[in-house]
Amino acid sequence: MFWNLLPALGGISLFLVGMLLMTDGLKVLAGARLPDILSRFTSTPFTGAITGAVTTAAIQSSGAVTVAAVGFVASGLLTFPQALGIIFGANIGTTMTGWLEALLGFKLDLGQVILPIVFVGVLLALSVRKAVSGLGLALAGFSLIFIGIEQLKSGLDAFQGVATPADFPPDTLLGGLKLLLIGVLITMVTQSSSAGVATALAALSAGAVNFPQAAALVIGMDVGTTFTAVLATFGGSTMARRTGFAHVIYNVMTGAMAFFLLGPETL
């Protein structure tokens, strides 16, 4: 069983490396403009939400955007309402990776297409020009994400008939809460809800879990992303702490709504 799990663990590792490379590359492309973007385009909660969503979708890190918002509130660059808009938008933008995985990573065989993109990305990353190098890192990271998904999917395929939904907490209220807690812990440990979502989608694709079980895991992972923001509030001002805990309250409330909308299978 352990040896069968190693290919799946390798896929998760490739996915995480891809996320790190893509995030670093996009940050290089954005340069020092991130604080300026966040502070200039948050005049209303609506524009703040759009800014948070777009920025998070671009740099693929809701944690970075949320922590930045907390820091800007602490430094007086943003007000509490402006930061709330950014945080709400960041929760929308962070779903981009999951949609890409669901629509592309598990629907198409991208192996032959992705490998040349990795090669092009590595060549660009060797450039002395900062913007070109950042683009190369982003391309290479983006490609590794889908290579990791392919590896994860093939690794979990070995568990078809071995691991079934019956091996996980059942589709009951208590079972769903257990899966939700597992999702929270996974994100707190890995600091990447995207990697957890990829694993849940791969397990669902392989038949290891059913839809309510996978959904409960993903909901827990979304709640677990608030851990970083809470850490960022330690030692901060009162408004910074309010911002961090508003993020927790928002994710817990939306998570609770999603959990009870799963249907009678879960309840």
Image (cartoon, helix red, strand yellow):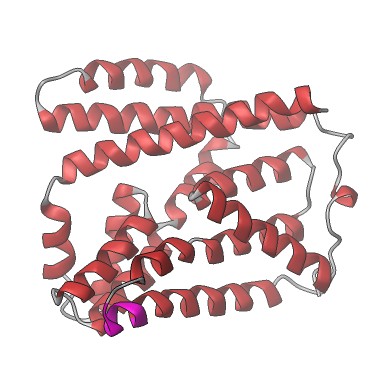
> In the image as oriented, which residue stretches furthest toward the front?
235
Q: Quadrant of residue 122?
A: top left
Q: Quadrant of the N terminus?
A: top right
- The residue at the point 23 percent across, 79 percent down is 82
Q: Quadrant of the C terminus?
A: bottom right
Which of the 4 image quarters holds residue 131? top left
- Residue at image location 79% in from the left, 43% down from the top: 208
Q: Left of 61 or right of it: where is 248?
A: right
At x 77% / y 24%, what residue is drawn? 4
- Magenta segment's dominant SS is helix
Residue 170 in view in this figure: yes
Residue sitting at 66 percent across and 47 percent down?
A: 200
Q: Is residue 230 above or below residue 243?
A: above
Q: Is residue 232 above or below residue 163?
A: below
Quick check: can you spot residue 149? Answer: no
Is 97 above or below relative to 264?
Answer: above
The image position of residue 24, as x and y in percent, is 28, 38
Most foreground residue, 21 or 92: 21
Circle count: 0
- 118 is higher (above) or lower (below) than 101: above
**Image x and y of residue 115, in percent:** 43, 17
Q: Which residues are magenta?
A: 237-242
Task: Give how far across and how far down residue 243 sits, in percent.
Answer: 34, 78
Image quarter of residue 183: bottom right
| 87, 105: nearer the viewer | 87
Q: Residue 137 location in percent, x, y?
A: 28, 29
Seen in the image, is 110 located left or right of residue 125?
right
Asked if residue 202 lies in the magenta stretch, the reply is no
